[in-house]
Image (spheres, grey):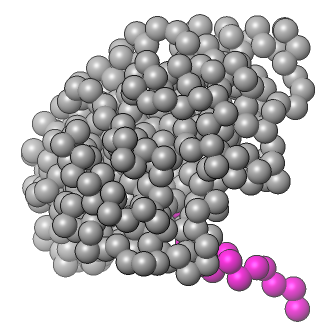
Amino acid sequence: MLHLAERLNRFSESQTIGMAKLGRELAAKGHDVINLSFGEPDFQTPIHIKEAAKKAIDDGYTFYTPVAGYPELKQAISDKFKRENNLDYAPDQIVVSVGAKHSIMNVVLCTVNPGDEAIIPMPYWVSYSAMIQLAEGVPVYIKTTLENGFKISPEQLEAAITPKTSLFIFSSPCNPTGSLYTYDELKALAEVFEKYPHIYIISDEIYEHINFEGKHHSIASFESIKDRVITVNGVSKGFAMTGWRIGYIGASKAIAQGCEKMQGQFTSGACSIAQRAAIAALNSDLKPTYEMRDAFLRRRNLVLEKMKSIEGFKTYIPGGAFYVFPDVTYYFGKSDGEHTINNSEDLCMYILNHAFVSLVPGSAFGDENCIRFSYAAADEKLIDALDRIKSVLQNLK
């Protein structure tokens, strides 16, 4: 009998993608569905970046690209790291991939052996855990709380480390919480890592430019651990280039060479046209990026204000990204007489089927008590979505 590979049973389908799929199915039946499940800016890619892509086509950039990326793009990334983050990554320490997700998967496959432990603070981006499982590693979770801003303490980190730990992975600003680590908080974590030289650190900084609290800080800036930090970034969030699929890493030369070798057997180099567009994005003025950031800040404040009127939503103020991750345990055990809410997945399905608003259950991110609400949508859609949610939740007693 034919069968599929056992590795498919190690992880689940992305619930972010799953909820968006259910939303599309309802929309196909004629319902007006507001999709707030995807982490995708609703802005168009800035004109100067589009023009660079058109020029690339006219200039004949239609052939295979170097596995690790065009030299000009790697130089632009190196310059960006130095200019914006004060990080010294030479071009040969940079690998360009098909999105930041691909970058992270490359690193995981290069640093995690079967049976190795990888520490992941909860809540976490949906794919971290599945990636570790694909590499036959063992995810080790550190629970955080809304009251502590969804951030781990140095004591929690040290308690989770064992001789089998090979990797620590986190994002700041964070998906799904929007929380971000301060310089002092990162310094305290770096001081723990100093004691354990066998651990690599993946710092996912894809939301770097969507920061409402000031300067972004990178854990790679601490000299004592910088050679073990892999800094991941890309152009999707900060430049509204999700569909272009360009991510990248800055890392030690050994890690970069490993990722290039790995990528050479998976995808080879990223799209030629997208790479030329990314060069324009990284080498140009950040004014369009800051305009998007300011729009996200306005939307965040709008959403938080509207959520105040929804009974049972326990919120906090996210410092970056474009998500709110409210605690919704108030609704667990409640019913409209026909449907009972037992968990965050039940609540998201109830909202989808009755309010026609697509959200993602917190269980997808390792926190059953919350739901993820993306405010990467137009103001009028956000207002409509929250009004609908408030209306249908009043039926749960």
Question: In the visual, does 332 lie left or right of 236?
Answer: left
Question: In the visual, does 119 lie left or right of 340?
Answer: right
Magenta highlight range: 1-15
The verdict on residue 21 being magenta is: no
Residue shown at 56% from the left, 25% from the top: 78
Instruction: Name the one closer to the observer, 42 or 236.
Output: 236
Residue 73, position as x, y percentages in the image? 66, 22
The verdict on residue 7 being magenta is: yes
Residue shown at 20% from the left, 30% from the top: 213
Count the marks: 0
130 versus 71 height, above or below: below
Residue 52, position as x, y percentages in the image? 68, 10
Instruction: Name the one closer to the observer, 240 or 108.
Output: 108
75 versus 211 height, above or below: above
Residue shown at 24% from the left, 46% from the top: 187
Residue 145, position as x, y percentages in the image? 18, 62
**Residue 139 in sight from this viewpoint:** no
**Residue 301 in sight from this viewpoint:** yes
Instruction: Name the one closer to the observer, 260 or 297.
Output: 260
Location of the C terminus by quadrant is bottom left
Kindly report the secondary structure that dominates the magenta region of the rendered protein.
Answer: loop
Residue 182, position as x, y percentages in the image? 21, 40
